[in-house]
Amino acid sequence: MGFLVVCAVYFLLPFFWLIVASTKNQGDLYGTFGLWFANCNLWSNLQLLFTYDNSIYVSWVGNTVVYAGVGALMGTVIASMAGYGLAKYVFVGRSVLFSLVLGANLVPVTVLAFCRGSMRQHRFRMSW
């Protein structure tokens, strides 16, 4: 139980700091204790954020929503069509294709990144 509490504090403390820091002005951010509230400037900070450089933050958020939404939607549609094709139709190489897709999804991305990094190190070591 104690371990879970320590893990919860460890993972939730940055979110608490984010909330506290959003209520401070720049002087309070560096001049007061970082994990507790000072003068509440949340509304002026939000006004500054949304009016900065002709409201460029709104454009950034909009671009993020569009790119993430379109990417998620297209990925879902393509994966659904591929899954339907693999489940519904029988064709030559179906089991091989299914095994490749399943194997590619079972391997964590960090393993692939580690392999690429170690291959790069090995290649540079050989070139010297």
Image (cartoon, grey):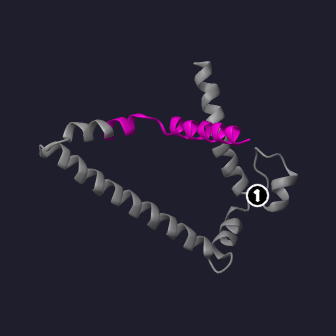
Q: Secondary structure at mark 1?
A: loop
In which quadrant of the rendered view does residue 11 lie? Answer: top right
What number of labels is visible?
Answer: 1
Give x and y (percent) for residue 74: 34, 60
Identified at 62% across, 77% down, the residue is 55
The chief SS type of the magenta part is helix
Of residue 75 and residue 25, the one placed in the foreground of this image is: 75
Identified at 23% across, 47% down, the residue is 83
Q: Would residue 124 appear left or right of 72 to someone viewing this image?
A: right
Give x and y (percent) for residue 25: 78, 61
Quadrant of the frame with the N terminus: top right
Residue extending furthest right? Answer: 31
Identified at 29% across, 56% down, the residue is 78
Q: Is residue 35 magenta?
A: no
Give x and y (percent) for residue 30: 85, 54
Quadrant of the frame with the C terminus: top right
Extent of the magenta region: 101-128
For disc 1, the marked residue is: 24
Q: Is residue 56 above or below residue 86?
A: below
Q: Is residue 54 above or below residue 49?
A: below
Q: Would residue 64 appear left or right of 128 to someone viewing this image?
A: left
Give x and y (percent) for residue 20: 71, 50
Residue extending furthest bottom? Answer: 54
Q: Would residue 6 appear left or right of 88 to someone viewing this image?
A: right
Identified at 68% across, 38% down, the residue is 126
Residue extending furthest front? Answer: 127
